[in-house]
Image: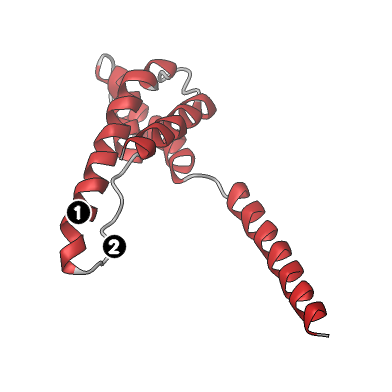
């Protein structure tokens, strides 16, 4: 009787875990939600040659540093340092590898978002 309950509980946990993973995979990243609108508004506001900087400024804008999450004071400095390093790593990687993929005429949102995600992965493994 006890083993049936344990098996049922394990089965429910596996199903719930799969549903959670599918839900996370379907939600769009904040970057891909921000970038297209940023490019359009930047192109409208700026005239050539300043509009050529829109991909760079929008990557910087949409790759906003993480908000400060409250943590114990002893860990706060270390957490902030890691977050800042991770942000600058992603910004440097995205500037080097992702900005050339985009222009005002052809924002290439999907390619840029994939590139930024790969920078996030690279920088996460370094920190």
Q: Position of residue 19 (x, y in %)?
A: 69, 59
- Residue 24 versus residue 4: which sits nearer the camera? 4
User: What residue is disc 1 on?
Assistant: 78
Q: Name the residue located 43 percent from the left edge and 19 percent from the top edge.
A: 102
Q: Is residue 42 above or below residue 62?
A: above
Q: How is the image coloured?
A: secondary structure
Image quadrant occupied by the N terminus:
bottom right
- Residue 57 versus residue 44: which sits nearer the camera? 57
Q: Is residue 84 above or below residue 100?
A: below
Say which element carries label 2.
loop
Quarter of the image where one finds residue 97: top left
Quarter of the image where one finds residue 125: top left
Depth check, mark 1 against mark 2: the one in front is 1
Q: Position of residue 79 (x, y in %)?
A: 24, 54
Quarter of the image where one finds residue 75: bottom left
Q: Name the residue located 43 percent from the left edge and 40 percent from the top edge.
A: 31
Q: Name the residue located 31 percent from the left edge and 51 percent from the top edge.
A: 66
Question: Mark 1 or 2 closer to N-term?
Answer: 2
Say which element carries label 1.
helix
Q: Quick check: marks 1 and 2 in contact, CB under 8 Å? A: no
Badge 2 crowding class, 10 Å Cα cut-off, few under 14, some 14 to 19, many 20 or more, is: few
User: What residue is disc 2 on?
Assistant: 69
Image quadrant occupied by the C terminus:
top left
Q: Position of residue 74 (x, y in %)?
A: 16, 65
């Amino acid at each position: 009787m006890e083993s049936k309950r344990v098996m049922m509980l394990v089965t429910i946990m596996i199903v719930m875990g799969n549903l959670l993973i599918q839900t996370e995979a379907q939600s769009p990243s904040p970057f891909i939600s921000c970038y297209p609108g940023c490019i359009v508004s930047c192109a409208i506001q700026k005239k050539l040659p300043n509009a050529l900087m829109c991909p760079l400024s929008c990557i910087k804008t949409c790759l906003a540093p993480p908000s400060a999450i409250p943590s114990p004071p002893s860990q706060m400095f270390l957490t902030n340092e890691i977050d800042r390093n991770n942000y600058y790593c992603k910004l440097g990687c995205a500037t080097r590898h992702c900005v050339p993929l985009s222009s005002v005429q052809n924002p290439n949102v999907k390619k840029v978002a994939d590139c930024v995600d790969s920078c996030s992965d690279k920088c996460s493994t370094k920190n």
